[in-house]
Image (tube, coloured by chain):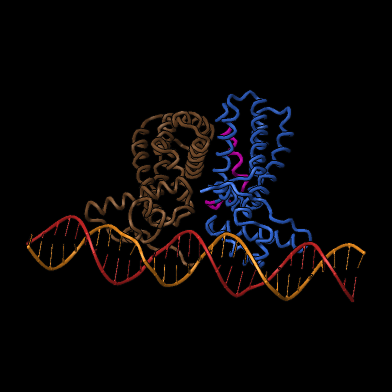
Chain colours: A blue, B brown, C red, D orange
Amino acid sequence: MTREPPVKLRKSPRQARARATCEAVQEAAARILQRGGVAAVSTNAVAELAGVSIGSLYQYYPGKEAILAELVRAMRAEMLEDLRRAARACDGQDITRAIHLLLAASLEHHRADPARAAAIEEAERHLPLDAETQALKAEIAALVIAVLRAHDVPEPELAARDLAAMTNAVADAACLAGERDVDAILPRLERAARGYLGV
Amino acid sequence: MTREPPVKLRKSPRQARARATCEAVQEAAARILQRGGVAAVSTNAVAELAGVSIGSLYQYYPGKEAILAELVRAMRAEMLEDLRRAARACDGQDITRAIHLLLAASLEHHRADPARAAAIEEAERHLPLDAETQALKAEIAALVIAVLRAHDVPEPELAARDLAAMTNAVADAACLAGERDVDAILPRLERAARGYLGV
DNA sequence: GCAGAATCCGAGCAAAGGCTCAGGTTTCAT
DNA sequence: ATGAAACCTGAGCCTTTGCTCGGATTCTGC
């Protein structure tokens, strides 16, 4: 019943082939996650698909949670970068433009592979997030809150949470329904967000 | 690798104690689902928490998927009832009122136990839905689409999907963040929906 | 070339989980 | 009261999964 174990790498890869091993494991885990959900991700399956022995896998990852955790961390880090850029661009713009920029940035990581993004987000819900990932999430939230506050949005924390939830949900639903064009989602979300914020 | 197995009851309970057994299993499964997600739901754990032997469980449910599937089916059936009532009440009302009624109905099943509702919705994403549940979902969607179409909403299917996704996501996020008052969510969703629909 | 570090391998153990089956208990109808 | 049907039980089989360990292989710096 005790949770909250260490969820970092067990050992850092020093040589190129080791880095390749780690990448193969990540890639395989993402593929399996995407196809069958968190339940389908077993260390044996990941190792096999990665073309790596189970022993090698455990040399770098202390368990399957660590593999997924790193997938999540990578996605969040990427998202933070996108949002940082967007937040900077928001400076001095009106709120309609700010909404556009923030939403577009939030959708950015859905662009390359929406199904994978959805799968990783789903995994995130089932993981005890490590401190680093939590910090990333907090910083992402803080960025959005700051922009909202700059435009005198009341209860910016609440608004940020609601808007983030809406954005992810609509994007995931669209992906699940087979929508291909990420850009088609943006205007719909903009309308909803403007309505939410009373613009 | 083949899916799509029968997911109905194996045998119908005839006597009162058998019905009590089934109910205990459902209740236990919901509790475990709520506490630990789909992965934590094992037939052994469910049987133990239900105070029922594993053999009895298998007398009525062909597997753990069937238990979860029935949980989902029950929730969807309830939701359909709520939405039917709401859709009837929408007749002759303006769109603002219609939005209010539909959203309130959609939130209805979050009222009693938001955490449980969120958990069941999450389970739904990982299950191969049986025909009956799919029919329920289709009818729910059809109801919303009909109301939207009556108010000349363009692409009502798309709008219904987006609005449903937004509603669930915001409600779940609120629950996760510890919000207690379901009624506080409604006005936020109404603003978003009106904005989305351009009202 | 060579020593040592880094990496890789995969058989196999222990635990957990899905599920069956043979046999016992309770309920119902007559 | 009695036989049949419904119901319950849980030991235990088999598969899957997480993970370790001893030993083989490859790389790196000198």
The residue shown at (39%, 42%) is: B143
Stretch in magenta: A176-194
In this rendering, would B107 be left or right of A76? left
**A136 or A182, nearer to the observer:** A136
**D24 or B155, nearer to the observer:** D24
| The magenta stretch spans residue B26 | no
Residue A158: x and y in percent read: 56, 30
Image quadrant in which you'd find residue B181: top left
**B19 or A95, nearer to the observer:** B19
Note whether residue A113 is visible.
yes
Residue A168: x and y in percent read: 57, 43
Residue C17: x and y in percent read: 45, 59
In this rendering, would B158 be left or right of A182? left
In this rendering, would B157 be left or right of A175? left
Quick check: D9 above or below B79?
below
Quick check: B103 above or below A114?
above
Residue B138: x and y in percent read: 41, 49
Majority secondary structure of magenta residues: helix
In this rendering, would B177 be left or right of B102? right
Note whether residue A180 is visible.
no
The residue shown at (41%, 38%) is: B113
Q: How many marks?
A: 0
